[in-house]
Image: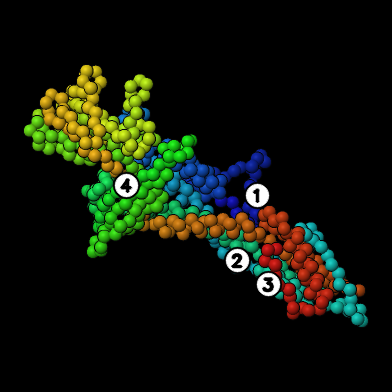
Amino acid sequence: MSRPSDHFDTPAPEAPTPDSDGNIVQPKLGFVGWLRWFWRQLTSMRTALFLLLLLALAAVPGSLVPQRAADPNGVTQYFVDNPTLAPILDKVQAFDVYTSVWFSSIYLLLFISLVGCVIPRAKHHFDALRAKPPRTPARLARLAGFQRRTLAPGDGGAPSVSAVAAVDSARRLLRKSGYRVVVFNSADKNGNETASVSAERGYARETGNLVFHAALVGILVTVGVGGGFGFSGQRVLVENGGVFVNTLSAYDSFNPGRFFTETSLDPYSIKLDQFTAAYETKADGAFGQPIDYNAYVTTQERGQATVDSDIKVNSPLRIGGTDVYLLGNGYAPKITVKDPAGNVVFTDSVPFLPQDANLTSVGVVKVPDGLAQQLGMIGFFYPTQAVSTTGAYYSTYPDDQYPVLTLNVYSGDLGLNGGVPTSVYSLDTDKMTQLTGGTTGVESIELKPGDSQALPDGLGTISFDEVQRYASLDIHHDPTQGWVLLFAASALAGLLVSLFIPRRRVWVKATEKSDGTLSLEYAGLARGEDPRLAAAVNEIADRHSKVLSDDRLGDVPAADTNA
């Protein structure tokens, strides 16, 4: 990093020694020299800014493709929709961007760069805070805002105010204005008594800059620690009694941090009593757009009574050290399958995945046991069914105004006995025979709530009992949330301080002339851009002149802190 604005001067480097021909010979760096060069490059401001930009760019893929930590179902669906591209992206960890090797490498390099920037700057700033303001320059006329004012001699031809007294009043005035001051007394080359005060303020600017960079380091550390000890998981609950108990086996998908242990799961339960959704019905351009989602739940922590709560979008439920977010929702038709004898072999509310804004949904029903053959069904659910001109079904509204369920039935091996995990949202039909729909010549099963229909080949019956809603919950635990907020607020405060507090030096010099007059000189010097410097010097001169002219050296006007 380049030197800070308050860095004290260092000795000039020695000039290189020429060889016998007069050519400059540069010394070889060597191993240690190259390490020093690499460290200086890594800890430079340019490198830190480049790494910060690179980190922002590296985070972009995380918003373009679904992430396993946040949306595992979306990742599964992405593999189904993009069977060629998805494996390639998976090899470069595009579905785990924020825990990938390349993202972590940039993250670590940025952390080292910021630490290497902050520590030397903090030392330089501490030394500058302990140092006294510099001596008054000999030629103030060369500095910004310079002006000279003269006080006429008093009775008997002597100065009405001595140089020491004038400078002492300036010292008190500047101190009340927030300046650090030091007084110098001397005599000029003509023997005239001279006194001056050197004042500076604005060290909070560099302090704010350091706080900003230190807070960035704190954010990096706390985010890393939170990722190591935190976890996130997802669970789908169907209304009217779907229950989640905070145990590892109860999650549909779970993404623990590196240092996660199962003992960190606080015991509690969440039951989804009802899920409601409100949609726009009046505005033509926004007809069918969601207005509000609300999951009404009953929660209970160990040893405590049950509590009625609700979970809304951007309004998570906080329980047991976790934040429970409403991640998604959809329909879960309750389906019952019976064998030819009328015995129930399958009954469940099956979550269907929405495919469009009107919640046309796709789901899979698997019946592995109880029938002569294993059955798999690919279903399409239409909350408000309509028919296009081509005869295809679609949904015109996301609420269940006219629900219809269609099913294509397959028989054969479901692939559940091979020991290979399979998704509940997909059906591998390679080893199965299609019995309805498609090119079979048999129409797909079509059901409305309460309807029942026979399965093909006398396998039994299937019924569509009722329409239920489900809510997809994201359970997130981050033990460092409070620290991240603290460091973020500190970074913002430090940035504002470093931007709006000027760093400046001001000098007031008084010289007693032989003719009895008192010459007063005022000037300032800014460290960086300070458009108000000249006005600030002029204001100090006016206030000081008023004090001297009123001969009220002990009565100094109140300081203008905005100068």
The one of 41 and 165 positioned closer to us in this rendering: 165
Q: Are marks 3 and 2 in contact (CB under 8 Å)?
A: no
**From the viewer's perspective, is 375 left or right of 326?**
left
The one of 140 and 434 positioned closer to us in this rendering: 434
Between label 2 and label 4, give the one nearer the viewer. Answer: 4
Point out the tag, 3 or 2, that comes first from the N-terminus: 2
Question: Can the viewer see residue 448 in this picture?
Answer: yes
Q: Amino acid at mark 2?
A: Leu
Judging by the rendered image, the residue that carries numbered circle 1 is 15
Point out the tag, 4 or 1, that comes first from the N-terminus: 1
| Residue 526 spot, x, y in % from top left | 70, 58
Compared to residue 96, the image places residue 316 above or below, namely: below
Judging by the rendered image, the residue that carries numbered circle 2 is 129
Between label 3 and label 2, give the one nearer the viewer. Answer: 3
Point out the tag, 3 or 4, that comes first from the N-terminus: 3
Point out the tag, 1 or 2, that comes first from the N-terminus: 1
Real-space Cα distance between discs 3 and 1?
47 Å
Q: Which mark is residue 176?
A: 3
**From the viewer's perspective, is 95 left or right of 122?**
left
Q: Tell me the element at label 4.
A: strand
Mark 1: few/some/many CA within 10 Å (<14, 14-19, 20+): few
Q: Are marks 3 and 4 in contact (CB under 8 Å)?
A: no
| Residue 141 spot, x, y in % from top left | 81, 60
Q: Amino acid at mark 4?
A: Phe
**From the viewer's perspective, is 501 left or right of 386?**
right
